[in-house]
Amino acid sequence: MLNQELVSLLNNQINMEWYSAYFYLDIYSYYTDQNLNGFGNWFYVQTQEERDHAMLFVKYLLNNNEKVVLQDVKAPDKIFKDFREPANAAFEHEKKVTASINSIYAVAYEQKDFRTMQFLDWFVKEQGEEEKNTEDVVKKYDLFGKDAKGLYLLDSELATRVYAPPTLVI
């Protein structure tokens, strides 16, 4: 049986992951509406990843005989003024997700809940990748995106991203 503080934090993380999927779906829609289909593709893949992250937390709780408590998912409310803003908002959001994962890990560590720590190890590594990848999109936009040809090439590069489901065994 898991510590109830951890159960609550893990349930909150499920909500954060669903919000992340919703947030990236909004960004996907923005870029696609702007005919930046490569950027849209990149964020569509991100949407799929976040959905799967939520489901991993759900499975972990259920596999530990804990109740999953679903919460309302807040609708994204950002209005983007230019092509850079969504990518930068994604980078800032990933930093918040990292902080949330780290705080859950800290409680698991304090409780000496090694199973939960092991489960979270994958997410700690994943968040490092998530921050790096979104920051790279922002940096590449800053380097190339203000020029029409550079934006076209960056959009073409982002169109090549494909979805790969997580391989985490719970």
Image (spheres, rainbow, N blue to C red):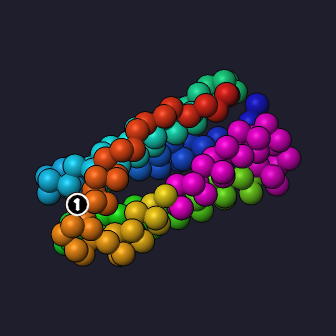
Foreground: 48 or 112?
Answer: 48
Packing grade of label 1 (10 A; few <14, some 14-19, many >=20) is some
Residue 46 in the figure: left or right of residue 14: left
Foreground: 129 or 149?
Answer: 149
Name, please, the residue furthest toward the right: 112
Q: Where is residue 46 drawn, in percent x and y? A: 40, 46
Residue 162 in the figure: left or right of residue 1: left
| 92 lies above or below 23 | below
Residue 111 in the figure: left or right of residue 152: right
The stretch of residues the image draws in magenta is 108-132
Residue 60: quarter of image: top right
Quarter of the C terminus within the rendering? top right
Q: Where is residue 154 drawn, in percent x and y? A: 31, 60
Dot 1 amino acid type:
Tyr
Residue 102 visible to an observer of this rendering: yes
Dominant secondary structure of the residues highlighted in magenta in the image: helix
Quarter of the N terminus within the rendering? top right
Q: Where is residue 166 drawn, in percent x and y? A: 56, 34
Q: Is residue 76 shown in magenta?
A: no
Foreground: 128 or 57?
Answer: 128
Residue shown at 22%/60% (left/top)? 152
Residue shown at 43%/36% (left/top)? 163
| Numbered marks: total | 1
- Judged from the image, the secondary structure of the residue bearing numbered disc 1 is helix
Q: Where is residue 33 drawn, in percent x and y? A: 13, 52
Residue shown at 54%/61% (left/top)? 132
Q: Which residue is mark 1?
A: 152
Residue 97 visible to an observer of this rendering: no
Residue shown at 46%/40% (left/top)? 49
